[in-house]
Image: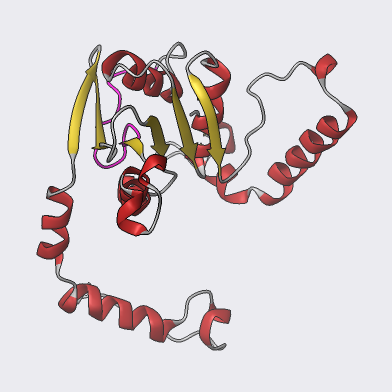
């Protein structure tokens, strides 16, 4: 970072240039010289980390036991491009509400798994259509941890996983809380109301016209191949 080669200033100021150069320089100076990594490293190492081996798929998760027995279990799923670290404060409040001015009777046992391929879970050894992340979460909660029924929360990518989890395992998922709504994986057109049809059509239009970052990250070109016909596509999955 100290060796960064800064570009010539763009002929507009502040964020109109795409990035406020002065602010970026301030951040780089802080990251290179003032950021206390060891303090944060110690905090990460002190988290209640556990690992589960789900038939050869390792999954890292945090576990916060509730402050009273027989509490509702809940699984929290982070989004992209993030980690379980964004959910630790929420997990602590849910597990011990009395420490934050809440009622201890509202406590939950909180499980916060790391998405495969994100810190701190390694990528899955194989990608199969038969087992998506929401199925891994159910196996973690139900089979590995022994929770017969549980709730779930998710935002961003985690909202889609949480939605699929409830759709696939309604007998186990008591309820879900989402920060974004995901469409059903394979909606039956005959079952849709006019309002649902309009919503799906609007979502498809937005995806086509405004989802540029997703289109860009879903396509790629093999190295040394300038031909458009060589472009390959991949479909992100949950």
Asked if residue 12 is positioned above or below residue 143 in the image, the reply reads below
Query: In this rendering, would 125 be left or right of 135?
Result: left
Image quadrant in which you'd find residue 59: top left
- In the image, what residue occupies the spot 39% across and 82% down? 23
Query: Depth check: 25 or 63 in front?
Result: 63
Could you tell me if residue 6 is visible in this image? no
Position of residue 204 measured from the top left corner of the image (x, y, whole percent): 74, 38
Image quadrant in which you'd find residue 127: top left
For residue 115: magenta? yes
* Residue at the limit of the structure toward the right, as seen here: 194
Could you tell me if residue 60 is visible in this image? yes
| Colouring convention used in this rendered image of the protein | secondary structure
Query: In this rendering, would 157 be left or right of 186?
Result: left
For residue 147: magenta? no
Position of residue 106 measured from the top left corner of the image (x, y, whole percent): 42, 41
- In the image, what residue occupies the spot 35% across and 58% down? 100
Asked if residue 45 is positioned above or below residue 162 in the image, the reply reads below
Query: In this rendering, would 206 be left or right of 124?
Result: right
Asked if residue 159 is positioned above or below residue 101 in the image, the reply reads above
What secondary structure characterizes most of the magenta part?
Answer: loop
- In the image, what residue occupies the spot 34% across and 46% down? 91
Question: How many numbered callouts?
Answer: 0
Image quadrant in which you'd find residue 144: top left
The stretch in magenta equals: 112-127
- In the image, what residue occupies the spot 21% across and 23% down? 52
Query: Depth check: 100 or 48 in front?
Result: 100
Position of residue 15 measured from the top left corner of the image (x, y, whole percent): 53, 80
Query: Depth check: 17 or 74 in front?
Result: 74
Q: Quadrant of the N terminus?
A: bottom left
């Amino acid at each position: 970072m100290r060796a960064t080669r800064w570009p010539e200033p763009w002929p507009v100021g502040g964020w109109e240039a795409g990035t406020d150069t002065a602010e970026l320089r301030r951040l780089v100076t802080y990251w290179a010289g003032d950021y206390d990594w060891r303090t944060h490293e110690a905090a990460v190492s002190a988290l209640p980390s556990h690992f589960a081996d789900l038939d050869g798929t390792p999954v890292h998760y945090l576990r916060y036991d509730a402050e009273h027995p027989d509490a509702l279990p809940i699984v929290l799923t982070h989004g992209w491009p993030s980690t379980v670290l964004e959910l630790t404060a929420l997990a602590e409040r849910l597990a011990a509400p009395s420490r934050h001015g809440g009622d201890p009777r509202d406590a939950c046992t909180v499980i916060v798994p790391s998405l495969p391929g994100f810190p701190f879970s390694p990528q899955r050894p194989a990608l199969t259509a038969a087992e998506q992340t929401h199925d891994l979460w159910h196996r973690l909660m139900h089979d590995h941890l022994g929770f017969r029924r549980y709730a779930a929360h998710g935002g961003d990518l985690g909202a889609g996983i949480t939605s699929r989890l409830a759709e696939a395992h309604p007998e186990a998922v008591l309820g879900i809380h989402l920060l974004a709504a995901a469409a059903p994986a394979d909606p039956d057109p005959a079952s849709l109301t006019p309002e649902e049809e309009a919503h799906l059509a609007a979502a498809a239009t937005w995806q086509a016209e405004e989802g540029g970052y997703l289109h860009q990250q879903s396509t790629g070109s093999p190295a040394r191949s300038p031909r458009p016909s060589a472009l390959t596509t991949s479909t992100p999955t949950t």
